[in-house]
Amino acid sequence: MNLATSASASTPLLSLEGGVATITLNRPAHRNRLQDEDLHALLAHFGRIEADTSLRVVVLRANTEGQPKPVFCAGYDLGGFDEPGKDASLFERMTDAYAALSPVTVCALNGSVYGGATDLFISSDLRLALEGVEMRMPATALGLHYYANGLQRYVTRLGLAFTERAFLTGRPFTAQRLWDTGCLEDLLPAAEFEAGLSELVRDVAALAPLAARAVKQSLRELATGNTAASGLERIRERERMTLASEDFAEGRKAFAERRAPKFSGR
């Protein structure tokens, strides 16, 4: 896997290779704390990814070089939060855009994660973590009511009890407790992390992209309670679309011929 890193701090980096987009948070000396310019850069990266239908997987990770203990992201930089002209909705718009990406998203939690950055972890479709990391949500300890869409993602993806403990105690979750919730695809020691990530990305990239994108969209709608007749009909329409697709024909042919399928996304 092509890992984009830089010795100097910068806005998040984007690399594209073989149908995989890798976004790397790149302020290791500041524990990858997100500033407004980082949020704008992420939004631009998401726009580029969404426009490229050849992309099948998005990997979100962090540069942790030189850190005594690896930190994926220390959250949003609250300095100047009350400055005139400050866009209080910018962070929520960024996380909403990430959650809405069409390709399958993988959070490679190669360090601890705090504050608003926990929403990037939760918003991902699949997650794996490095042994020894932790996750903490200190919003209420800072006097902040978290934004609505972030709370909804916490509850729908990790459950009410998990969310209550996160927000109403401010205590951290260890990597083992995260594993116990079932939210992680894998929990790996440092020596196995990169290989485990590469294997997961390879498996996801091998899926039929048309079906993977359609199922992802349907699952997200169902998770938010969209079970009205109109919502279920949209899901059935996606099913009909995949039944008539070239990918499904190729998948059946490859299965019969006992070979790996070559999907086109059509």
Image (cartoon, rainbow, N blue to C red):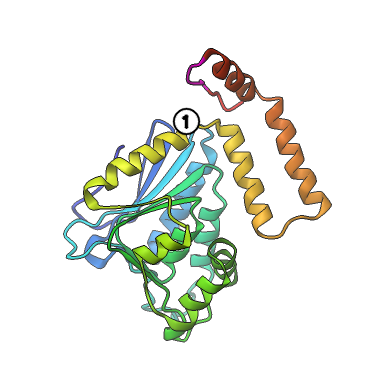
Residue 111 visible, this orientation: yes
User: Picture coordinates of residue 52 (x, y %)?
Assistant: 51, 36
Q: Residue at x 39, y 30 (%)?
A: 18
Determine which quarter of the picture holds residue 81.
bottom left
Residue at 71% across, 60% down = 225
In front of the other: 258 or 64? 258
Residue corresponding to mark 1: 206
- At label 1, which amino acid type do we have? Ala
Question: Residue furthest toward the top?
Answer: 257
Q: Is 82 left, or right, of 264 in this rendering?
A: left
Q: Is residue 44 above or below residue 55?
A: below
Segment tinted magenta in the rendering: 258-262
- Residue 246 placement (x, y as % from top left): 63, 21
Residue 136, placed above or below residue 95? below
User: How busy is the neighbourhood of tag 1: few (under 14 within 10 Å), some, or many (20 plus)?
Assistant: some
From the viewer's perspective, tell me whether residue 169 is left or right of residue 100: left
Residue drawn at the location 34% of the way across and 39% of the way down: 198
